[in-house]
C-alpha cells in the first residue's frame, strides 16, 4: 500500500511530468496494479498485483489534465483555474467540493506553481484521504 501523504509530497515537489509518479499514483488509486520502484525503471508500466503477467502503461496523470481528471469522484464538483490573485500564490489551483447544494464545503484543494495536471493530482489524492 502506498502512503498517500508521502505520495502527495512527491507530487507537490515535482517540476513536471514523471512516469514513475504516474505509476505510483495508479497503484495508489487502483490497488489491483503494482510496480516495484526498487527493481524497475520508472517507465510508467505497471503489472497486475495478482501476478497474472498482465501489464499496461499507467495513464499520464502528471502530464494530462484529462488523465488527472479521471481520479476525481464523479459525485464531486470542482473549480479549477490558472492565474494569481496574490504574487505569492501558485499559478494553478483546483478545489473539490461535495455535490451538496446546501453546503459548499471543500473536500480538498491542490495548487502547483507550474502544472495544472499536478495540481489536480494533489487535490484528487487529498480527496481520497478526506
Image: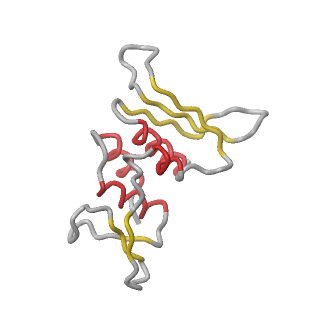
> Residue placed farthest to the bottom in the image?
52
Q: Quadrant of the N terminus?
A: bottom left
Residue 42: x and y in percent read 25, 61
> Residue placed farthest to the top in the image?
86
Residue in view at x 21 percent, y 65 percent: 41
Query: Dividing the picture into quarters, in which one does residue 116 lie?
Result: top left
Query: Dividing the picture into quarters, in which one does residue 53 lie?
Result: bottom left
In the image, is residue 86 above or below residue 31?
Answer: above
Residue in view at x 71 percent, y 41 percent: 99
Residue 18: x and y in percent read 29, 50
In the image, is residue 104 above or below residue 33?
Answer: above
Residue 9: x and y in percent read 34, 44
Residue 129: x and y in percent read 52, 50
In the image, is residue 93 above or below residue 66?
Answer: above
| Numbered-mark total | 0
Give the colour scheme of this rendering: secondary structure
Residue in view at x 34 percent, y 40 percent: 12
In the image, is residue 24 above or below residue 115?
Answer: below
Q: Choose between 50 and 16: the one closer to the eye.
A: 16
Residue in view at x 43 percent, y 29 percent: 92
Amino acid at each position: 500500500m502506498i502512503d498517500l501523504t508521502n505520495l502527495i509530497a512527491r507530487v507537490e515537489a515535482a517540476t513536471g511530468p514523471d512516469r514513475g509518479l504516474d505509476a505510483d499514483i495508479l497503484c495508489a488509486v487502483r490497488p489491483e496494479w503494482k510496480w516495484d520502484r526498487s527493481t524497475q525503471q520508472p517507465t510508467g508500466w505497471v503489472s497486475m498485483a495478482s501476478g497474472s503477467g498482465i501489464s499496461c502503461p499507467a495513464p499520464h496523470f502528471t502530464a494530462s489534465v484529462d488523465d488527472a481528471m479521471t481520479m476525481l469522484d464523479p459525485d464531486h464538483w470542482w473549480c479549477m483555474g490558472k492565474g494569481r490573485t496574490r504574487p505569492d500564490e501558485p499559478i494553478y489551483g483546483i478545489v473539490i467540493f461535495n455535490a451538496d447544494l446546501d453546503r459548499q464545503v471543500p473536500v480538498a484543494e491542490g495548487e502547483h506553481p507550474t502544472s495544472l495536471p499536478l495540481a489536480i493530482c494533489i487535490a484528487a489524492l487529498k480527496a481520497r484521504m478526506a
